[in-house]
Amino acid sequence: MTRNEYIARQRQAHGRLSLAVLPVHYPKELLTALDVLAVELWGPPGPPRGDGAGRLQSYVCALARNALAFLAAGKAEAVDGVLFPHTCDTIQGLAALARELGGFGKAIFTFLHPKGPPRPSARAYLEAELRALAGELERFTGRALRPERLRAAMRLHREIDRRRALLLDERRRVALSDSALYELLRRGEWLWPEDHLAELRAAAGALAPTPVQEGVPLLATGYVPEPAGLFGALEEAGAYLAADDYAAVGRRLSRPREDRGDEGDPLRLLAEAYFDAPPCPTRSADSRGRMRYLEGLLERSGSRGVLVHVQKFCEPELFDLPALRSTFAARGVPLLVLEGELEAKLPAPAVTRIEAFVEMLTAGRGA
Amino acid sequence: MILRRARYELQGRLGGRLLAAFEGWLARRRHSRRRPGPFGPPLESSRKLKELMSVHYFEGRYADGAVPVAWVTSGFPVEVLRPLGFHAVYPENHAALCGVQRLVPALSDAAEREGYPRDLCSYARTDLGSLCSGRTPVGRLPRPDLLACCTNICQTVLYWYRALSARLGVPLVLLDTPYVYGSTKPHHLRYVQDQLEELVRVAERISGRRTDPEALLATAGKAKEGTELWGECLAAGRHCPAPWTAIDGFFHMAPIVSLRGTDACNAYYRMLRDELLDRARRGVGGLREEKYRLLWDNLPIWFAVRELSTLFAARGFNFVCASYTEAWAEAGARIDLADPLGSLSAAYTHVLLNEDLEHRRTLLGRLARDYQVEGAVLHSDRSCKPYSIGQVDLRERLARDLGLRVLLLEADHSDPRAYTAEAGETRLTAFMESFG
């Protein structure tokens, strides 16, 4: 079933409205509680198509160029609106462009999450911003946000995140290829949460009692694992992704603190949970904190190399490159930087670089 | 500490002025040998500008250890730091200076060797490269005690200052200003004010002083007056012929960026305004012959500013206004001395690059009408995405709604490696030919 067919079926069977959502961080629980289907728009990959393709300059990231061309070409007709989180200057500008100067003619929402450390001002603001968005979505859907519905949605997403985290944390014991695992995880970008949870439950059977992955374990950090051909190239080279810090995947897993309870105003709890998520440069965590987090991921996963998979012109990621290089160089861990432009296929030079990198990691190790 | 303070004061008052006087003498010698070009007589105020900025940078060499030093983004409300005795350094202004002096490739190379990719903002690369290599055209920049960053101009400054903070081990205070789509929401302004109050406490701890409300009020008042005076200088460009060019304006905006909220800044703009109005009365133009009036959008191309302005001036084209210089005249109206922190929050949230495209289109339309322009050059700046995103649509709207001739020129504000001079010149020449 295509995404458009799925969106149509959700509307027919459940009366659900749907929103296209630009990357990265947004309160999905709020959408679920109001019975709104989130369909994330990471590009799509490949060259931008249609009349809107030239509306953003070539030095703007491919994700934004493709998304604008996609929306302007009417390819998102199946959804009822678009939500633009405050990820970076580009997506912020894209929201302004789509809204004011022609393009996508449907409802537009913004979610301006705070940047920087979890200061009291940021906590109070985030709660107010969530309330404001909730109010706009209530008007959009014609439904009232009931606290018990929001609590149930938060429980549902915690369960989803717990199961996704298990698959990523125990990657060595998961009897799935990277391609299969990431296809499963990324279906969560557009499936209704309960449907995604059902697939995750079914995948629990792939968890073996002992390690089954035999390739060279790698830690991947970056924006989005596109093109999907990356996984095939890694497998061919004899490696697999043992730890994930992709903004689209592992970096969005909520891992609530042990002392977080369920009591109290759910919107306040939702705001608090935002600050528990792993560090992400699009939310401007401090660089040293992020490096410590990645070192922890590396150690826990037993990864032998680091794959930094960035999108060209993506400033939040690119500014951390020197820190990434020096952090892992200090530990003697090899690092490969792959820069992409959301191509439909992994370019041949990238395949060669992956092969050489994995070959270098396996030399003398008998792996 | 006392000795350092004395040296800082002495160098600012005496050493900087002596150096500025010597540089002024050299400049006059150069000017006397210069052949007449397409430009009108130079502004007398330029000498004072040179002196003012030389003293500022010279003083800065002796600031660390004498007074608290803050490195500050151009859009940060410096009004809260001045009453605490901070010497404010503007890395963006420093990077622009490096751009004019064509030092960016070498400085950027130093940053790139550290792993910063060339696709990052060239201002950031320039300053990070300057830090890594120790090279600067201003002698030395004082080491900061505080990094103060406001995201109202872009998010890039946050990543850049975060890198500075990690490298220098210096605290970073952030003013995160939610982007304005249409109008601000009350909780957005509350957030900005809450942060302002939080960061003032950090700045007080670092400076070892408490904020004197009277001093804050006085500084806010000076900043308000300064932006208004700057606005009056810009408005002089409405006269035909315009008594100066927007290219002059790019250089003369340095005090409103770097010395906002000081007496020296305001005294300078009073002098400049009076000179411009006097030139306008006497019919003295920025060009010898002004045939066509143009608008510039986005940052200047610092490394080619002389070549490009001469190319246009030689054909009688004068840039009489620019959205970039205008942006620095907008904030003052919102500063309310009855509520300094609240109104500073509103003023610094409503800056050009933190407002949506409709605001920008309205501003460009107003400038086009008020300054009677016939065409516009939109600098599509590789290093400034917030300014450049939407320009393709703006080009269509300005042409369709206002009947302007509009050219989109792709370049970079300070990295010459991102600009092909020959191709650019050909496009610009063809653009000018279209005026007949």
Image (cartoon, rainbow, N blue to C red):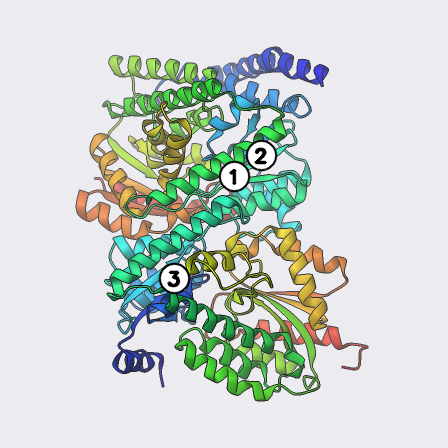
Is B334 on the left-hand or right-hand side of B166?
left
Q: Can marks 3 and 2 be said to lie on one chain?
A: no
Q: Secondary structure at mark 3?
A: helix
Q: Label 2 belongs to which residue?
A: B202
The disc labelled 2 sits on which kind of residue? Val
Q: Residues within 10 Å of mark 3 (few under 14, many from 20)?
A: many
Q: Can marks 3 and 1 be said to lie on one chain?
A: no
Chain ID for label 1?
Answer: B
Is A157 on the left-hand or right-hand side of A65?
right
Measure how far apart labels 1 and 2 are at the Cα level: 13 Å
Measure how far apart labels 3 and 1 are at the Cα level: 28 Å
Let me know if residue B364 appears in the view: yes
Q: Position of residue B5 (x, y in %)?
A: 67, 16
The disc labelled 1 sits on which kind of residue? Cys
Of the 4 image quadrants, the one containing the C terminus of chain B is top left
Chain ID for label 2?
Answer: B
